Amino acid sequence: MKRRAFLSGLGGAIALPVLPRAARAATQIEPHVRAITGGAQVRKGRVKLELPQLADNGNSVSMKVSVESPMTAADHVKSIHLFSDRNPVTRMASFHLGPRTGKAEVSSRVRLAGSQRVTAVAQLSDGSFWSDAADVVVTLSACVDES
Amino acid sequence: MTARIQVPRETKLGELVEIRIVIQHPMETGYRHDDVGHPIKRNVINALSCRYNGEEIFRADLSSGIAANPYLQFYTVARESGELEFSWIDDEGKEGLERQAVVVKS
């Protein structure tokens, strides 16, 4: 029993330093997401955010975001927002779409200041919000302070 | 500010049209310093819009989180032959405007 208690205590000590980082990351984007959703529930799914797992250069990382939607006048994606949990500017971009867009898919190249989690939030015409996130390991960060 | 726009040479009515645009722009973040240590002012293209025969089909709000020489790929449904009009503006107030013809065969 003593050994078990010791081991679980050890596990806790190791797990502890990891927790605050994830928590901090979530709190950084939270107010920005809230500004878009107005506090409405954001569900996981329907959105697909594609980023490389490993990016050599954070100055230019290809990104593709798509949403499952028929894109009709009655049911379409109104907007897609991209959030970074480590960049100095949290809301990276917002794309506004409509039924005439035909397909809810946007590709671009983003800047990432270090390894992080990027979150995409989509607003549908029925008022619901959906999201997806992708973790990216960045070898060379986009220069934030000095060039 | 020059831009390169790619759309298919011709499309069929009702088909998806893939639109690609690259604009030559430094997308200066505002966090960098020049050789003598003075901060370089932020200057990014903050808004871009695309109109299809006058009706807006796509709009983007951008920030320093978008790479230099911003690239965007999006879609529209071919409705009638006409013109795609792209307009954008940066933090210094410089505006860009490009037009691209769309040929729709029925």
Image (tube, coloured by chain):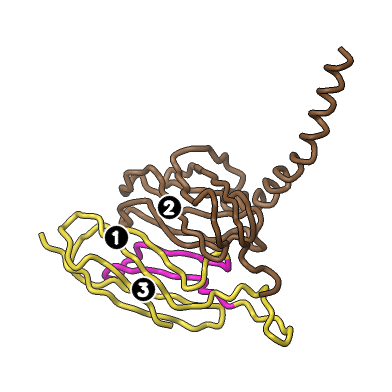
Chain colours: A brown, B yellow
Q: Do the residues labelled 3 and 2 touch (CB within 8 Å)?
A: no
Q: Is residue B59 above or below residue A120?
A: below
Q: Nearer the viewer, residue B81 or A118?
A: A118
Majority secondary structure in the magenta region = strand
Report crowding for label 2: few under 14, some 14 to 19, many 20 or more residues within 10 A (C-alpha). Answer: some
Q: Nearer the viewer, residue B51 or B4?
A: B4
Q: Earlier in the sequence, mark 1 or mark 3?
A: 1
User: Is circle 1 on the same chain as circle 2?
Assistant: no
At mark 3, the secondary structure is strand
Q: What stretch is highlighted in magenta?
A: B43-64
Q: Is residue B55 magenta?
A: yes
A57 sits left or right of B1 in the view: right
Report crowding for label 1: few under 14, some 14 to 19, many 20 or more residues within 10 A (C-alpha). Answer: some
Label 2 belongs to which residue?
A78
At mark 2, the secondary structure is strand
Q: What type is the residue that disc 2 sits on?
A: Lys
Query: Which of the image's four quarters has the N terminus of chain B?
Result: bottom left
Label 1 belongs to which residue?
B18
Calculate the distance from the C-alpha at mark 1 to the C-alpha at mark 3: 14 Å
What residue appears at the point 19 percent right and 54 percent down from the top-left corner? B14
| x and y percentages locating residue B89 in the rendered image | 48, 77
